[in-house]
Amino acid sequence: MTHDEHVPHRENIPAYALGALDAEEVAALEAHLETCASCRAELAQYRSVGESLLTTVPPKQPPAALRKRLQSRLPGAKKSPRLQSTFSFSRLALEIAVVALLIFNLFSFLQLRQIQSQQASLSSQVEDAQVAVAMLSSPNVRLFPIDDDAVAGTVILSNEQNQAVLIVRNLPLPGENQIYQIWLVKPDGGRVSAGLFLPEVGQSYTTKAILPAQPFSIFVGLGVTVEPAGGSDAPTGERVFRVDF
């Protein structure tokens, strides 16, 4: 190799030792170093000087502000913002309050419906009792006792007023989806429905006014059977009792 060809490679040795050459210059110099012992020796001298400089200068910590600023610029320094939880105790408390209010309103509504039902039942019972009292004070009223193994009571009948009142004591509740139905009995055995009723819950007796569309004088008796809820066109269930006029 001529002196002119050797000079460019020698000039690049200091930069190579500091890692300041680009890829093409590094490749060319490393290829030259394989065949040039003098350049390898010179590179070794530069590296020795660089290492001695590093060991003679004591390490020094950079200022905290500078270090923090440099760390913030590192790729991994920028952390993704933590997802803010949408959970809020105040919102939870509001939702609980709304649910509680809805439950309270529903409970109050059901209680009101129950009270209204009880009031309607009590009002009907009072009216029937008033009818019975008024009938008892009238002349020509007949009383027919109900004498059955499980049921006791009285039928108050007024042909002049064409009405009757059924008074039954300790009548049990019928089965689920069942009701008591009153039948007026014709001389030929035919039955005419005279109303539906259920026992008064919590009461020892039940009263039911009977106001038929036909005169009582054409009937010879009264009976009660257990029928499906809503009643039947003719008796289908068990007979509870019968009273003959």
Image (cartoon, grey):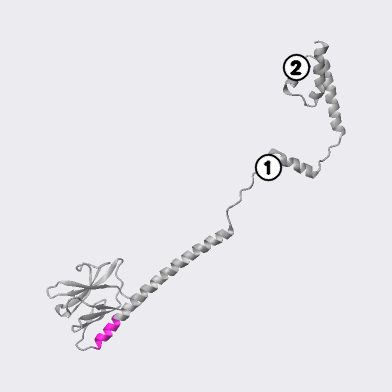
Q: Name above or below for residue 176 compared with residue 218.
A: above
Name the residue furthest top. 2
Residue flagged by tag 2: what amino acid is it? Ala
In the image, residue 165 lies at what x, y percent? 25, 80
**Res. 16 image quadrant:** top right
Q: Quadrant of the N terminus?
A: top right
Seen in the image, is 89 located left or right of residue 215?
Answer: right
The quadrant the C terminus occupies is bottom left
| Magenta stretch in the rendered image | 128-137
Q: Between marks 2 and 1, how big is the CA–CA gap?
A: 42 Å
Closer to the chain start, of discs 2 and 1, is 2
**Residue 205 appears in view:** no
- When the figure is inspected, residue 6 is found, relative to residue 55, above or below; the finding is above
Magenta stretch: residue 150 in it?
Answer: no
How many marks the image carries: the answer is 2
Which residue is found at the position 72% from the left and 42% from the top? 72
Residue 78's tag is 1
Q: Main secondary structure of the magenta part?
A: helix
Q: Return the residue found at the far right.
A: 56
The amino acid type, in three-letter code, at marker 1 is: Lys
Image quadrant assignment for residue 80: top right
Residue at image mark 2: 31
